[in-house]
Amino acid sequence: MTLEEIWPLFALRIRCGPLELAPVRDDDVAALVDLAQGGIHDPAVMPFMFPWTDAEGDELARNMALHYWQSRGAFTRQRWGVELVVRRDGVVVGVQAVGTRNYLVTKTGETGSWLGLEHQGRGTGTLMRQMLCAFLFDHLDAEEITSGAFLDNPASMAVSMKVGYRANGATRESRRGGELALLRRLVLRASDLVRPLDPLEVEGLDAVRPLLGLD
Ligand SMILES: CC(C)(COP(=O)(O)OP(=O)(O)OC[C@H]1O[C@@H](n2cnc3c(N)ncnc32)[C@H](O)[C@@H]1OP(=O)(O)O)[C@@H](O)C(=O)NCCC(=O)NCCS
């Protein structure tokens, strides 16, 4: 068997316009580490619930590798997530992720994403989220998609609004282990999705659905 036959997510490709999303493989980790070490956000603010970008150098690199391995290794039908490496015109620019719990019942996924600083502000964050949401609704039978953004993260909020998410309350969180921060909760229904202008091309879906228990 090939590795793609053993682990069908490795054969999944989602393409639209200049972007391609593909589950992170070990070969992608070095490029993602280079991007993260080059900066993802102003260090004075923390956009992530888990402040993984506070680590630096070798520690950041090892933590990222462990995160991608853990995400794959912890896969169960009751709790799975997929981290997709985003390429724009063939260049690695960031990650678009989805996490789920009891997906066969909830049909809900929570999205999260990041881009290297030099790749932000060109519409990539919006398109990669539109692609993942269209894929989840059209090909994985999703019924609802959620996300969250701290109130001081206008870029993430703007992307969610452009894609069609609606505000769904806020939670009080402890950020960086000590500071109170409000996390805006967001929810997207299929009928509200603002679809990408170009058609979505999906490769490798047939073996992914049974892996998730959908067929
Ligand atoms: C969030 C993120 C993925 C968005 O990607 P992106 O490619 O920059 O997003 P886009 O270019 O598609 O859209 C960004 C929107 O935010 C808006 N925006 C950016 N900074 C803003 C600010 N300070 N105030 C108001 N709006 C702002 C832009 O104007 C744009 O909206 P527009 O197209 O209507 O003008 C990216 O900024 C990122 O990686 N940020 C750091 C990590 C992060 O915050 N991840 C999300 C955690 S919830």
Image (spheres, rainbow, N blue to C red):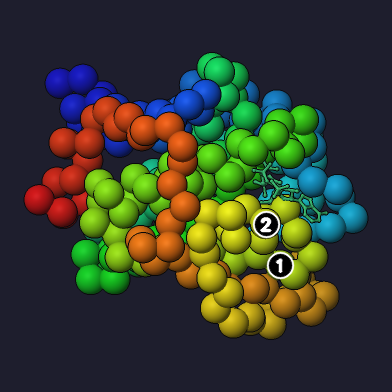
Q: Secondary structure at mark 1?
A: strand
Which disc number belongs to residue 74?
none
* In front: label 2 or label 1: 2
Is 180 placed left or right of 170 in the picture?
A: right
For the point 19% across and 27% down, which residue is it? 5
Which disc number belongs to residue 158?
2
Does mark 2's beta carbon lie closer than 8 Å to ligand 1?
A: yes
Picture coordinates of residue 81, whole percent (x, y): 40, 52
For the point 16% across and 36% down, which residue is it? 206
Residue 176 visible in the picture:
yes
Which residue is farthest left? Answer: 215
The residue lying toward the viewer, choosing from 113 and 190, is 190
Q: How far apart are labels 2 and 1 at the CA level? A: 12 Å
Residue 49 visible in the picture:
no
Q: Secondary structure at mark 2?
A: helix
Amino acid of disc 1:
Phe
Picture coordinates of residue 64, whole percent (x, y): 61, 40
Is 168 placed left or right of 8 in the picture?
A: right
Which disc number belongs to residue 150?
1
In which quadrant is the N terminus drawn?
top left
Picture coordinates of residue 128, whole percent (x, y): 52, 40
